[in-house]
Amino acid sequence: MNKTIVITGTAGFIGFHLAKKLLLEGFNVIGIDNFNDYYNPKVKEARSKILRDCQNFKEFRINIEDFEAIQKVFDSFSVEVVCHLAAQAGVRYSLINPFAYEKSNISAFLNILEIVRHKKIKRLVYASSSSVYGGLTKLPFSEKDRVDTPISLYAATKKANELMAHCYSHLYGIQTIGLRFFTVYGPWGRPDMAMWIFASAISKGRKIQVFNNGKMKRDFTYIDDIIDGTCSAIFAEGLGQYEVFNLGNHRSEEIMDMIKIIENELGKKAEIEFLPLQPGDVPETYADISNAQKKLSFSPKIPISKGIPKFISWFKGHPEIVQ
């Protein structure tokens, strides 16, 4: 019998790609998502339609904050692994709507931990974030670094998830694997992220806002590399009871270089408004991936020179979604 894997957030960017890969490999996937309107729901609906075409996919449209609702789902299946990717995303949005983060990222994560505990599920893989590195200036960021200085509520909730996972691993013997994702991009990406925002504005001749006066650097990581690392976290043997891994491209790229590639692929120049660094933002991210290389055989392969053109090609091919 094929393994059954629960993925929360299957209508989201990473959850969609992970579910699609596992379904193609013959696994049974139970998808949970609430299809909220943080960004355009038609993007989520389009992703979901692709997954629903697979016979070994079952979708449940519920809130993970609703313990009884998710308990009913788990009561109906024998689940080997949970990959918890659902969360309220976005650093800047956490300044506007903080209570969404408490519900989606703290209460809901506790629900998942309790389900995993009582159902005696073998492994919980969950999404953390590079945002936990907060105001650290030592680069590259390592899992060995102390991350006690989050500078956004979003980052604080992700650090809280790691602490909660540690507690449950210690108390109940649950194996928890946290993944600190670094600036994930690619086809079917998120409309609230800079690459999509820039591509949309440049294609329409609108001005783009570039923060920190253009002196921003990010460890851009292509979605296929992220999915490879996440699958390794789901299936790798020999992992500890409590693990946290950086999943990044192990290179820090200038935001202006990203913009130049988008310009080249669209054949249009960007009109840029330079602005100061925004509250909650960090000027640079850069992942030390040595731990993931060693334990997950993680080896990112796609630089932005190849990844961004793949994203723009998808972007231009889906006007009904991106407009």
Image (cartoon, grey):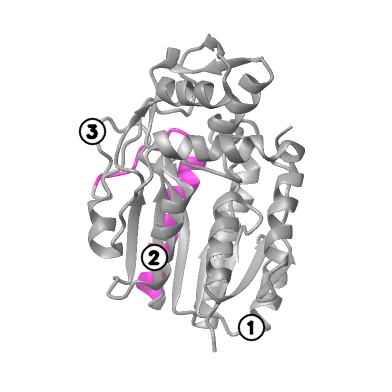
Quarter of the image where the C terminus is located: top right
Please give left or right for residue 112 compared with residue 159 in the image.
right
- Residue 99, image x and y in percent? 64, 43
Camera-nearest residue between 150 and 72:
72
Which residue matches tag 1?
77
Q: Amino acid at mark 2?
A: Ala
- Residue 322, image x and y in percent? 70, 35
What is the number of the mark on residue 264?
A: none
Magenta stretch holds residue 65 = no
State how far apart marks 2 and 1 are (Cα).
22 Å
* Sequence-first disc among 2 and 1: 1
Which residue matches tag 3?
138
Q: Amino acid at mark 1?
A: Phe
What is the number of the mark on residue 233?
A: 2
- Residue 256, image x and y in percent? 43, 20
Magenta region, residue range: 145-171
State how far apart marks 2 and 3 are (Cα).
26 Å
